[in-house]
Image (cartoon, rainbow, N blue to C red):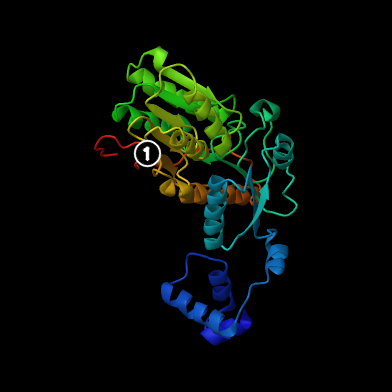
Amino acid sequence: MRDVAEHAGVSVRTVSNVVSGYTHVSDDTRARVQRSLDELGYRMDFLARGLRSGRTGFVALAVPFLAEPYFAELAQAVIRAAARRGITVLVESTEGDSEVERRILAGGLTNVADGVLLSALTVPAAEVAGTVPDFPLVMLGEHSVGDHFPRVGIDNVAAARAAVEHLLDQGCRRIVALGGNSSENGCQRMEGYREALSAANVRRVNWLVVPVEDWTRPQGYAAVRHLLEGSGPLPDGIFAFNDALAVGALRALDASGVRVPGDIAVASIDDIPESAFTHPPLTSIAPDLDVIAERALTLLDEQARRAADGNPPPGSAPQEATPFRLVVRESSQRLPTTA
């Protein structure tokens, strides 16, 4: 830093402020210091910074399945947001194992990271009721383990309701809820489905639920093939609880000669990159993953600063609902839409 300070004609403290991302440095000074950093090939010694600050410069991100596009996209969003803050992300896959999620909630990753971002899938809230994490922790997504854990994600009920309302706007009245199960995500999306149908005065006989064990392509394919082989009247819409189920459903409909959206319109949630390239392209609810990542890292940093100052955690943890939007594509678009 002394070499850089001499080269740039500033104090060592100013160089420290620039490399640490301190905001109160003029643009001209920051640019001059950055030129010197680049010319001299300066690299921060993260181990030394950690010893001085008590921080490692790492955060841990735990997601259920890295092979699933939604969680891969979420990880990329967190990595991008962390890089802007000079933070390195350590990624772990829990495989949806509740025991692994319990270990993380108990501080199992804090020996290598300053804080933890956890996208939980299976651990029941009742198992951690009354406990308050003694390390920086933010839950990502819609699965909650209690209001005492900070959480950032979309409003699951509202997202499901928006998808079903869109199908209703396209003239659908026998809409299948594809993906019902006992998970918290499943219950929330089922609630949004029911709210939309109830508000539209759709008769209960047309409330159709197709349960699945897992929200995967094979499960969506098998469930819809079984539905089409049944003796009852066909639905005119499918609301899949995530894009993976919807991709499987589209394949089953195509294999059975069902026209989409002419016979059955399809919409879902997640808007993974694959959705724009299915046949036909898939209508989906798109969460703003960059906003989720930014807000989660901000909450994590606030917790770390509070702990460093010796302040206790607040009485109630923030539960933040981030924006989402309906991306209308050919799989559902029967009528002109302004969505």
Nearest the eye: 102 or 272: 272
In the image, is 192 to the left or to the right of 131? Answer: left
Three-letter amino acid code of the residue under disc 1: Ser
In which quadrant of the rendered image does the C terminus lie? top left
Residue 25 drawn at (x, y percent):
47, 70
Can I make out residue 280 in this image?
Answer: yes
The quadrant where residue 145 appears:
top right
Residue drawn 62% across and 82% down? 2
In the image, is 228 to the left or to the right of 16? Answer: left
Nearest the eye: 207 or 294: 207
Residue drawn 74% across and 36% down? 99
Nearest the eye: 281 or 184: 281
Residue 20 drawn at (x, y percent):
57, 67
Question: Tag 1: Cα neighbours inside 10 Å, few (<14), some, or many (≥20)?
Answer: many
Residue 57 drawn at (x, y percent):
65, 60
User: In this figure, which residue is indicated by the disc labeled 1?
Assistant: 331
Work out whether 256 lies above or below 296: above
